[in-house]
Structure formats: structure tokens, C-alpha cells
Amino acid sequence: AAKNAGRNRFSYFTPDMQVEAERRLRLTSDLRIALPGKQFQVCYQPIVDLATGQICKAEALIRWLHPERGTISPLDFISLAEDTGLIVPIGDWVFRQAVQQARQWRGQFHPSFQISVNMSPVQVRQDSLLCARWSDYLAREGMPGQSVAVEITEGLLLQAESKIDEKLLTFRRAGIGISIDDFGTGYSSLAYLKRFDIDYLKIDRSFVQNLSVDEDNQALCEAMVVLAHKLGLKVIAEGVETAEQRDFLKAVGCDFAQGFLYSMPVPPDEFELLAWPRLAERAADAQGSMAVS
Ligand code: C2E
Ligand code: MG
Ligand code: MG
Ligand code: MG
């Protein structure tokens, strides 16, 4: 009977699924060598202060430069990394890159610059020491907590078993910023916004799209800003693509904006030219002339 059940189960396995399973298998074995093979890159997307128009923060976003397949989006490999546990070393690597980048940019261009790093729920669940390790790393590097922020999703806050209270407290004590990513798309519960000490609420880009024509999204965005401010959080709007969206968000008091209107996520050297064009050019010139002399 077991044999029959096995055979029956197999009949649900269509050729398409076979192809997909093989693709995942290959990608997984490639993923195992991606970190030692230096195939990852961290790109940075600017976050703009809506009051001044200045770039004051960035989000670190990983890219996989696959030797045969070209650039692979995190949407296509983060879940693989989670299933294999590879998310732990990969996530640590992104965090350390972001800390070193924050150190350089704070020293060279902007003393209070902050870089945010994504932390998936699986990452926290699989690795009970993650928060302590990241906090220790910052301290060891002599970097202030505010130089980084972690982006978590709403779902994580609802997982009692993840001991998320304690873990966020570790970040809190280290002075690390905490953001709620993709706000409004998960099981939004207003209670946790009060219960946890959170710094930033990131409005998901699905609410920002069509802002100029969709009155419901206008109402939702405005309400999220009012709510966040009443609870003492700052608001970052994600996925801002047009000047109209920016103007609306500014008018309702949103604090920060991030999106293709300003820039896509870019490598560090491009980011510098975008955020601090005159300083970055001068620094490049100085380096060039030093190299010549
Ligand atoms: P996220 O944290 O919500 O990041 C924002 C995503 O929206 C990025 O996609 C970004 O490129 C994209 N985006 C930014 N502005 C716009 C816009 O104006 N319009 C549109 N259509 N899209 C915009 P990306 O880089 O492909 O990352 C996708 C997701 O992968 C991220 O979503 C995050 O959840 C995850 N991810 C990226 N890097 C990491 C990482 O280092 N660790 C972990 N755990 N997850 C990561
Ligand atoms: Mg994010
Ligand atoms: Mg997001
Ligand atoms: Mg999002």
C-alpha cells in the first residue's frame, strides 16, 4: 500500500514541477558557493528627507551576480537561502558590509548617516543569537547603534515563539534603529506598534502606487502617517516613483521617501556621486592626483 501511495503521489509531479525542482536544486548548489566566491554585492537605495530634499539614509539591498545567469534578484533567492539556512551567513555578511559602509560615509560625507538592513523572519527564528551578534559587532567596531537600522516585517512581531520581545530589546539597548517594513501588507495589528519600541514605519509601495488617482490609497497613507506620528514613529514611504506621489506624501506630513523617483538601488560609488556629488568628485580627484604623483 505504501508503494502505491508513493506512486500516486508521484503522478502529481508534472513535468513543469520537475523543471522547477531541478532549477531550485541547481540554484541551491550555486548558492552554497556564492558567498565564498564573492558573488554577492550590496546595493544602496537612497532615502530622502522630504522636508529638505536631502538624502539622509539608505537601504542595503543584496544582489547576486551569478557567473552564468547574470544578476539574480533577492526575490528569487532569499527564500532558497532561508530553506537551506544559508540566510544566516549571508545576512551577517550584508550587515557587516552595511556597517562598514556607514562608517565610511559618516566619516567622509554625512555624520549622522544611517543604513538599514533587512532581516527576514526566518533569519531570526533560525538563529537565536542573531540580535546579540549584530549588536556586539557594532560595539566591537566602535560604531554607534544609530548608524544602522533593521527592517523587520509585521509577521515577525506576531510570532510569540520567536521571543521577539527580548531580541528587539537587544537592538534597542544597543541603540540600533528598528523599522517595520512593508507596513499594511501583513497582519497589521495596531497593538504591537505601541507594545514594541519602534522608530520607523515604512508604508508599503502598494499604497503609494496610484496615489494621484486612488482616493482610498490617499486616505490610507494619510491615516498611517497620523497614526505613526501619534505613537512617536517616523514614516518612510516606499516605492515613490512620481513627483505627484512625493508632493502628496509631503503634504500629509510623511517624513521620508524612497523610490525610483530618486534612484534605484545602486553600488556604493554611484551612490556617493548621487548623494554628495561635489564632495565625491573632489575625493575622487584627490585620489587621482595622489595616484599620479
Ligand atoms: P524590501 O525590503 O521591501 O525592499 C524594497 C524593494 O522594492 C527592493 O527590491 C527595491 O529595489 C524595490 N523598489 C524600491 N523603490 C521602488 C519603486 O519606486 N518602484 C518599485 N516597483 N520597486 C521599488 P529588491 O532589491 O528586489 O528586494 C526585494 C526584497 O528582497 C526586499 O524587499 C527584501 O524583503 C528582500 N531583501 C533584499 N535584500 C535583503 C537582505 O540583505 N536580507 C534579507 N533578509 N532580505 C533582503
Ligand atoms: Mg526593506
Ligand atoms: Mg520594503
Ligand atoms: Mg516592500
Image (cartoon, grey):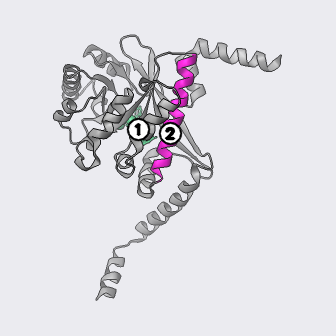
Q: Is mark 1 within 8 Å of ligand 1?
A: yes
Looking at the rendered structure, the secondary structure element under dot 2 is: helix
Please check the rendered image and state whether residue 89 is part of the magenta-colored stretch, yes or no: yes
Q: Quadrant of ligand 4?
A: top left
Q: Residue furthest left?
A: 191
Q: Which residues are magenta?
A: 86-108
Q: Residue at x 22, y 29 (%)?
A: 217
Left or right position of 92 against 243: right
Residue nearest the observer in this picture, 135 or 10: 135
Residue nearest the observer in this picture, 194 or 250: 194
**Amino acid type, label 1:** Asn
Please check the rendered image and state whether residue 35 is part of the magenta-colored stretch, yes or no: no
Q: Crowding near pointer 1: few (<14 within 10 Å), some, many (20+)?
A: many
Q: Is mark 2 within 8 Å of ligand 1?
A: yes
Residue 176 shows in this picture:
no
Q: Are marks 1 and 2 in contact (CB under 8 Å)?
A: yes
The disc, 1 or 2, on the residue closer to the chain's N-terminal end is 2
Give the quarter of the figure containing the C terminus: top right
Q: Position of residue 284 (x, y in %)?
A: 68, 18
Residue under numbered circle 2: 94
Count of number-bearing discs: 2
Marks 1/2: CA–CA distance = 9 Å
Numbered mark located on residue 20 in the image: none
Give the quarter of the figure containing the N terminus: bottom left
Residue under numbered circle 1: 118
